[in-house]
Amino acid sequence: MVSCKNSQVSKQESTQKSVVKSNITDEQLMDKVQKDALKYFWDYAEPNSMLGRERYHEDNIYPDNDKHVITTGGSGFGLATILVGVERGFISRKDAVKRLTTAMDFLAKADRHKGAWSHWINGETGKTVPFGKKIMVEI
């Protein structure tokens, strides 16, 4: 194993790091993975749009002032986790419908470009958040 920080990793250390506990069943593992995925999109959703944030900082410090930036691709994955959460009994159907209604109402009003949403959207305003400082050009 080679890394930028330490190119000398012993074989024993490497072996110890690759050991995976096998004392849980496949079903228990699936539950954990699905609950953890749902947790990100449910507990840490952008509070106005209720969609998936581009990033979440537990310390609430956002150096790039991007606390309310949602990602449409990640939000699509988040919507799927909500459906799985209902199916698996992790969240109620009523709560899921409320959350999904808020998200869809937000997207109905958000900026679109030739019918498509941008990758990043400000979750408070619905305005496109560009990738950089260059001017957006309509195609």
Image: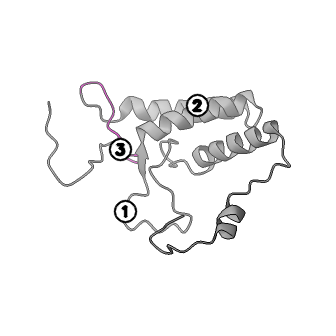
- Please tell me how crowded label 3 is: few (under 14), some (14-19), or many (20+) other residues with Cα within 10 Å: many
Say whether marks 2 and 1 touch (CB < 8 Å).
Answer: no
Would you say the magenta stretch is mainly helix, strand or loop? Answer: loop
Q: Which residues are magenta?
A: 114-125
Say whether residue 109 is left or right of residue 130.
Answer: right
Task: Name the mark on residue 65.
Answer: 1
Taking depth in this image into account, of 47 and 38 the one nearest to the observer is 38
Question: Is residue 63 one of those drawn in magenta?
Answer: no
Say whether marks 3 and 1 touch (CB < 8 Å).
Answer: no
Question: Is residue 115 one of those drawn in magenta?
Answer: yes
Q: Amino acid at mark 1?
A: Asn
Secondary structure found at label 3: strand
Secondary structure found at label 1: loop
Report which residue position mark 3 lands on.
Answer: 120
Rendered location of residue 50, percent (x, y): 52, 42
Mark toward the start of the polypeptide (2 vs 1): 1
| Residue 64 vertical placement versus 72 (above, below) | below
Rendered location of residue 66, percent (x, y): 39, 58
Task: Name the mark on residue 80.
Answer: 2
Say whether residue 92 is left or right of residue 47.
Answer: right
